[in-house]
Amino acid sequence: MKKSIHSAEYRVVLRTLVDLRHKAGLTQRALAGRLRREQSFVWRIETGERRLDVVEFSWVCRAMGIDPAATFAGMAEQWDYGAPAPAPAIPRAAEPGEPPSTPPAKRPKPYLSRYRRA
């Protein structure tokens, strides 16, 4: 399972929060002031550098004057739960005379301890 911060669903969360902040007429600095945090806190959330948990999501929504439950419900409607996961790509074999599509695997370096002499 991949981390949720890199998922399409989390991108919907980030895009929604940025759009709602703009609709509320707030800058990152103004929203940060309402949260009693620094502006970089809001920037890190909006860029996906910092993960936002459910409680913080509620705080951010309330600081913008919006209902967290309604906001979450609206985002959940945009998530595509019913679609099957995409099938993994099957690498095709290289034709004779064609270079392989992936480089050969590198051999691991031999382990040398600082206490053992080579």
Image (cartoon, grey):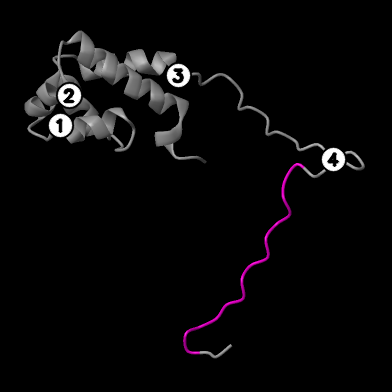
The x, y position of residue 85, in whole percent, is 60, 27
Secondary element type, mark 2: helix
Q: Determine whether, in the image, residue 5 is placed left or right of residue 70.
A: right
Residue pointed to by mark 4 = 94
Q: Which of 29/59 is in front?
A: 29
Amino acid type at image mark 1: Gln
Taking the spot 25% from the left edge, 18% from the top edge, the residue there is 69
Q: How far apart are marks 3 and 1 (CA)?
A: 29 Å
The residue lying toward the viewer, choosing from 107 and 52, is 107
Q: Quarter-wise, where is residue 92 in the image?
A: top right
Cα distance between the residues tagged 3 and 4: 38 Å
Q: Name the residue under label 2.
A: 28
Which residue is tagged 1?
A: 39
Circles 1 and 2, Cβ within 8 Å, touching? The answer is yes
| Magenta-drawn segment | 101-115
User: Residue farthest to the right?
Assistant: 96
